Image (spheres, rainbow, N blue to C red):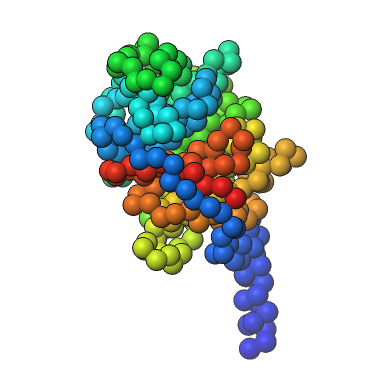
């Protein structure tokens, strides 16, 4: 019996080392935080808001869009919940838009990236990301008529290990590299990176960066598996943090400069417990790289600020 117990302990140690995390590393207890509803979006056209990105050209603005089947448009909303712009992406189709991210292109131009990455039925041989210059908001405090972008740049890619569903698109603010975090019902997912040098007109193979396994968690008003399913993600504007949203929690990692992203993600995240939303689908950082904003997919659509 003693020999069997020793052997079992050695197996547990090996599994723990293989996974890159100690058993029980994912926290159940949240860090102290405060959630405050700042606004309800006035625009009823935003009935399935499925992503959130802080404006780079104008940080008082957030960008969002509707989920699959909606118009191929992005919306600018201000912090009072008013729509400040509706911009149609030329020659685009909303097959399954799931997330939006902001950053800069190689010339330093403020840019939006729209993730057409959803695949609930695992039918897609490849996914795509639309890249457009971040539109200018010309009328201060006033909504403007619908406009249209120039022809977008489209980046196509496929997973190296089979088809995946995903709802999270990230752009690193320092390297400008694109990442996708996949989603599964059991919490087992992975972070993938586009090639650092993007190639137009071809389907690029994604590179797996890290495997992650989000845990089940009991929270009143949600099922335990709601905590497993990833719905959005974002890097902080200064590159120091990364946050992932699920239907129940926010998980945040510190990203020390001396560690690679894969190494940083081997450390246990902190858990943040925001006010429950019906279906939290978008998250982003504010310009201070600490304050978080989240949004829900269903009407009425609340905009929440989360501070620690």
* 224 or 264: nearer the viewer: 224
Give the percent coordinates (x, y) of residue 135.
Answer: 43, 17
Q: Residue at x 54, y 38 (%)?
A: 285
* 295 or 80: nearer the viewer: 80
| Vertical comparison of 117 with 111: above or below | below
Q: Residue at x 43, y 65 (%)?
A: 219
| Vertical comparison of 165 with 195: above or below | below
Q: Residue at x 61, y 41 (%)?
A: 290
Q: Name the residue at the right extreme.
A: 258
Give the percent coordinates (x, y) of residue 36.
Answer: 47, 48
> Image check: 244 left or right of 151?
right
- Asked whether residue 298 appears in the rendered view, the answer is yes
- Asked whether residue 190 appears in the rendered view, the answer is no
Q: How many marks?
A: 0
Give the percent coordinates (x, y) of residue 1.
Answer: 63, 88
> Image check: 263 left or right of 145?
right
Q: Residue at x 59, y 58 (%)?
A: 31
Give the percent coordinates (x, y) of residue 228.
Answer: 44, 56
> Image check: 147 left or right of 138?
left
Residue 77, by quadrant, is top left
> Image check: 67 left or right of 54?
left
Q: Name the residue at the top extreme.
A: 150
Q: Name the residue at the bottom extreme.
A: 1
* 243 or 41: nearer the viewer: 41
């Amino acid at each position: 019996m003693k020999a069997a117990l020793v052997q079992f302990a050695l197996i547990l140690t090996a599994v723990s080392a293989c996974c890159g995390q100690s058993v029980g590393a994912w926290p159940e207890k949240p860090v102290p935080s405060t959630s405050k509803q700042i606004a309800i979006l006035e625009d009823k056209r935003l009935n399935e808001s499925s992503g959130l990105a802080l404006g780079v050209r104008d940080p008082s603005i957030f960008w969002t869009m509707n989920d699959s089947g909606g118009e191929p448009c992005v919306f600018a909303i201000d912090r009072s919940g008013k729509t400040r712009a509706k911009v149609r992406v030329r020659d685009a189709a909303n097959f399954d838009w799931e997330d939006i991210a902001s950053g800069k292109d190689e010339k330093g131009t403020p840019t939006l990236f729209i993730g057409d990455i959803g695949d609930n039925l695992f039918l897609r041989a490849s996914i795509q990301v639309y890249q457009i210059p971040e539109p200018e908001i010309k009328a201060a405090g006033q909504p403007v008529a619908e406009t249209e972008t120039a022809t977008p740049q489209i980046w196509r890619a496929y997973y190296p290990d089979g088809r995946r569903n995903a709802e999270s698109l990230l752009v690193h603010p320092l390297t400008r590299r694109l990442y996708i975090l996949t989603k599964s019902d059991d919490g087992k997912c992975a972070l993938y990176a586009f090639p650092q040098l993007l190639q137009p007109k071809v389907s690029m193979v994604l590179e797996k960066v890290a495997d992650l396994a989000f845990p089940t968690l009991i929270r009143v008003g949600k099922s335990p598996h709601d905590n497993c399913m990833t719905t959005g993600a974002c890097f902080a504007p200064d590159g120091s943090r990364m946050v992932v949203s699920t239907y129940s929690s926010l998980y945040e990692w510190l990203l020390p400069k001396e560690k690679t992203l894969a190494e940083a993600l081997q450390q246990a995240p902190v858990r943040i417990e925001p006010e429950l939303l019906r279906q939290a689908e978008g998250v982003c950082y504010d310009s201070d790289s600490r304050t978080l904003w989240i949004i829900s997919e269903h009407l009425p659509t609340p905009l929440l600020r989360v501070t620690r």
